[in-house]
Amino acid sequence: MSKTRVLVSGASIAGPALAHWLHRRGAEVTVVEQSPGLRPGGQAVDARGVAKEVIRRMGLHAKVRAVCTDTAGAYVVDADGQVLDTHRAEENDGDGYISEIEVLRGDFAQVLYDDTRDGVEYVFGDRIADLTQDADGVDVTFASGEQRRFELVIGADGLHSALRGMVFGPREQFVRHLGLVLAFYTVPNEFGLDRWLIDYHQAGRSAGLRPVHDAERAIAMLSFPSPEFDIDYRDIEGQKRLLREQMAGVAWETERILAHLDSTPDFYLDHVAQVVMDQWSSGRVGLLGDAAFSASPMSGAGTGLALVGAYTLAGELAAADWDPAAGFAGYEARMRTYVEDNQEIGRMHVKMLTADPDGEPAPEPDMEALMALVERAVGGPELPDYAGVPDSGPTA
């Protein structure tokens, strides 16, 4: 019997994580990525609660820990750099404000790629240009002109998913801007960082510095409120101008951080947004990770949602003998509450960051309900063992 052929679009974290589980469940997997290779660097991503269990089941716990940023904790400081609050990585069993498993996005992607490249076909520098599906499969035309047929196609191509737009409709239907813009980029570590993240807040805007393995470098993190956001995410120079304008006058080390904008080797700026969809599949095409249910960076759960989603999607499809209707239905049923809880935390975090200090004070939260929400969001769904489903086991 021939293997089920699955095409995955996107080779950051969600795509290769899904490829890992699809391959273990017996599928023939191709991952297509429009970038010419893996994208290095990027912001630090976290794994908390149930996501750590998925990493363990993947057999990657030691490899992921080996590339962790080893951040000891975070200091919240005032304009003079005096510490106002301290958060340690070991608090809340490593699932607190600073996660014990914190990895640069590019490093995590490299671990996943190294784990899967021998059993999975990777196609870099190409993308899905068109597709049509019927009752038995999906015909895909790539930008390179190549045409191939697959039984299933999964979009793991992020917040700005091209596949989602192609199959489900324009981004405006699903992407919800939360009123905050986030930027980060690499700067020289001329600030004396040593394993501690530093965070400064001023009137809804924030500036921070995050340590990395290389003591000579640090990652700058800046954010500002913005009810509207209409700059093209590909217009880097326009984004830098906007960042300078919005962060002008912010105290602490902000001016020194902005001084490195033109010399940084990497730069990212985008609106903080969530993807809200009633359904994450259409026929034989499904979505995973930020493409389906971005909870925004402010949730701290993007990587967890991708990892748990990858495990669940592959397991449900295999358990349904690769029937897309049953497999996608099982995936959505198991993931929906987990997604919605983390999206609620993302929205709450943005509201706290953008609150007007001179406005009406927010009502006191129901702490019992809040802690229950946090526990559900971190703990996530119960992971099925998928007993009886094929499993070739983790890579040696």
Image (spheres, grey):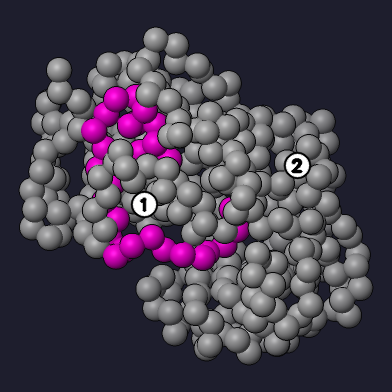
Q: Do the residues labelled 2 and 1 touch (CB within 8 Å)?
A: no
User: What is the secondary structure assignment of the residue under circle 1?
Assistant: loop
Identify the amino acid type marked 1. Ala
User: What is the secondary structure assignment of the residue under circle 2?
Assistant: helix
Residue at horizontal 71 percent and vertical 61 percent from the top: 353
Is 352 rendered above or below residue 387?
below
Residue underneath mark 2: 94
Relative to the observer, which residue lies in front, 231 or 157? 157
Relative to the observer, which residue lies in front, 208 or 345? 208
Left or right: 89, with 63 as reference point: right
Numbered range of the magenta stretch: 17-46
Is 315 rendered above or below residue 356?
above
- Label 2 environment density (alpha carbons within 10 Å; few <14, some 14–19, many ≥20): some
**Badge number at residue 11:** 1
Q: Please say whether residue 323 is visible from this viewpoint.
A: yes
Left or right: 160, with 341 as reference point: left
Q: Please say whether residue 218 is visible from this viewpoint.
A: no
- Label 1 environment density (alpha carbons within 10 Å; few <14, some 14–19, many ≥20): many
Is 189 rendered above or below residue 336?
below
Residue occupying the far front of the picture: 396
Relative to the observer, which residue lies in front, 350 or 221? 221
Residue 393 percent coordinates (x, y): 43, 25
Residue at horizontal 43 percent and vertical 79 percent from the top: 236
Give the CA distance from mark 2 to mark 1: 27 Å
